[in-house]
Image (tube, helix red, strand yellow):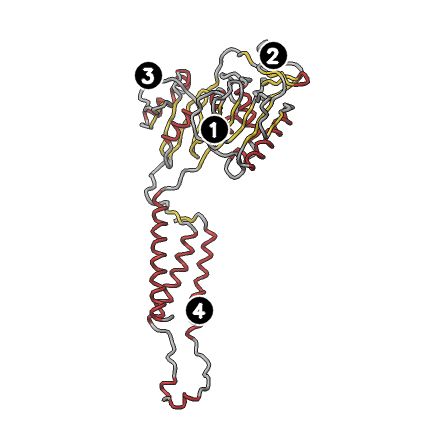
């Protein structure tokens, strides 16, 4: 048995309180002179003191209640109930021929060992033969997250087999079990044509060969770029949130992003009807999105219907979002900007740092068995308190 809040176990020391109170009431009192006592017999004047059996049971009951309360607030967990014998390996494979060919040895070895292997599809189909690819070849980050949620089990080790390209970063993050291993291959095609932004002061914003967002007076001559920019002029953003804390957080992140890359983003808190916004960040539902505008909607769990609308399940505040707590919000906003303006080709591989940021390990959820045990402890505690009150009132103790 383990405790989530073991410090509260010091509360067991409070068991001395009912003991002290009990013996305080049992001590001999001081005799007070009273005229009528001279008519009473001597034996009737002797108070009956000492520890009675009933009072002793009441004392034990009160001490047990204190101990039970300390154990209850310490939140015990019983890891021994229903614990699997060993860790189970689960393999999740992107339905792609190059992925299968590259990891054929690992997949065939897993099949020989009888380990569970699945395709990352809408139905999360069981893989029996690596040569037979499923009919559905569409692969997105949201589809990958859905398959992971289906296969995530207690005490399991998840192995992911993927093609490393920028398509993975369509979602702000991908939650994986605490025990996971990533097997990724890099696309090896010819150098793709890139896009860039034309900023004020004749600065150009693009992604350099190191897969980093940068700007300069001229484009990198070793890369291939489109003849015209994807966007020209200053960037305008509308930040419209009902939650003032979230609004201040977003504004600060945009200012940090703008300062680092010299973007000169103009941020409006209230909508200007005469301004065509390049970026709208809000916690309200988007109706009829403008195709060239990037929308970021927080606190919504929905499947995007437009490529320029991004939904974040979490509200972007330090209390609710890990991106904000870890200081990664400006970086993620920059990734959203890169994807919207297609500054990085879809076949461009992610860096190791980006992969580590994208995949967020999460602890396994608590089993229901310890929760039921704690509920029973709470039920016993309430019953004992009721019995103690009944005995105390009956004996006037």
Single out the residue that lies furthest toward the right: 201
Is 276 left, or right, of 164 in this rendering? Answer: right
Q: CA distance from mark 4 to mark 2?
A: 85 Å
Badge 3 local density, few (<14 within 10 Å), some, or many (20+)?
Answer: few
Q: Position of residue 15 (x, y in %)?
A: 43, 62
In the picture, the disc for residue 21 is 4
Disc 3 versus disc 4: nearer the observer: 4
Label 1 near label 4: C-beta < 8 Å? no
Q: Is residue 45 or residue 74 the one in the foreground?
A: 45
Assign the C terminus to one quadrant of the image: bottom left
Whichever of callouts 1 and 3 sits on the residue coming sooner in the sequence is: 3
Q: Secondary structure at mark 2?
A: loop
Label 3 near label 1: C-beta < 8 Å? no
Badge 1 local density, few (<14 within 10 Å), some, or many (20+)?
Answer: few
Whichever of callouts 4 and 1 sits on the residue coming sooner in the sequence is: 4
Badge 2 local density, few (<14 within 10 Å), some, or many (20+)?
Answer: few
The answer to whether residue 218 is visible is yes
Is 182 placed above or below 217 here?
A: below
Q: Secondary structure at mark 1?
A: loop
Whichever of callouts 4 and 2 sits on the residue coming sooner in the sequence is: 4
Is 383 left, or right, of 266 in this rendering? Answer: left
Badge 4 local density, few (<14 within 10 Å), some, or many (20+)?
Answer: few
Disc 4 versus disc 1: nearer the observer: 1
Whichever of callouts 3 and 2 sits on the residue coming sooner in the sequence is: 3
In the picture, the disc for residue 132 is 3
Residue located 58% across and 23% down the image: 273
Q: Position of residue 266 (x, y in %)?
A: 62, 25
Q: Secondary structure at mark 4?
A: helix
Mark 1 sits on what residue? Answer: 285
Whichever of callouts 1 and 2 sits on the residue coming sooner in the sequence is: 2
Disc 4 versus disc 2: nearer the observer: 4
Is 41 placed above or below 66 here?
A: below
């Amino acid at each position: 048995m383990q405790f989530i809040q073991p410090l509260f176990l010091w509360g067991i020391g409070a068991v001395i309180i009912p003991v002290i109170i009990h013996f305080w009431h049992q001590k001999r009192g001081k005799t007070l002179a009273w005229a009528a006592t001279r008519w009473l017999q001597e034996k009737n004047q002797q108070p009956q003191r000492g520890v009675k059996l009933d009072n002793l049971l009441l004392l034990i009951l009160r001490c047990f209640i204190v101990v039970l309360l300390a154990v209850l607030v310490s939140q015990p967990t019983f890891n021994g109930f229903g614990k699997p014998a060993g860790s189970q390996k689960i393999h999740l494979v992107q339905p792609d021929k190059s992925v299968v060919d590259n990891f054929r040895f690992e997949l065939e070895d897993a099949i020989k060992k009888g380990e569970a292997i699945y395709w990352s599809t809408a139905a999360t189909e069981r893989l029996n033969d690596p040569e037979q690819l499923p009919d559905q070849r569409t692969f997105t980050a949201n589809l990958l997250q859905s398959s992971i949620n289906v296969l995530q089990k207690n005490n399991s080790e998840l192995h992911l087999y993927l093609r490393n390209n920028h398509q993975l970063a369509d979602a702000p993050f991908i939650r994986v079990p605490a025990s996971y291993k990533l097997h990724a291959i890099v696309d090896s095609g010819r150098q793709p044509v890139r896009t860039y932004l034309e900023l004020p002061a004749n600065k150009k914003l693009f992604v350099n060969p190191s897969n980093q967002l940068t700007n300069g007076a001229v484009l990198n001559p070793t890369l291939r770029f489109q003849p015209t920019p994807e966007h020209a002029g200053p960037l305008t953003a509308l930040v419209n949130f009902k939650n003032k804390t979230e609004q201040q957080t977003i504004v600060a992140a945009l200012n940090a992003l703008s300062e680092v890359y010299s973007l000169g983003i103009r941020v409006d808190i209230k909508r200007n009807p005469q301004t065509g916004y390049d970026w709208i960040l809000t916690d309200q539902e988007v109706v009829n999105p403008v195709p060239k505008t990037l929308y970021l909607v927080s606190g919504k769990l929905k499947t995007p219907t437009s490529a320029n609308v991004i939904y974040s399940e979490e509200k972007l505040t330090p209390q609710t979002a890990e991106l904000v707590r870890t200081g990664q919000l400006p970086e993620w906003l920059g990734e959203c900007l890169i994807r919207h303006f297609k500054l990085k080709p879809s076949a461009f591989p992610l860096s190791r740092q980006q992969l580590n940021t994208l995949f967020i390990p999460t602890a396994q959820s608590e089993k229901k068995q310890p929760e039921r045990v704690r509920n029973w402890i709470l039920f016993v505690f309430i019953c004992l308190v009721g019995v103690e009150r009944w005995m105390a009132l009956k004996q006037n103790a």
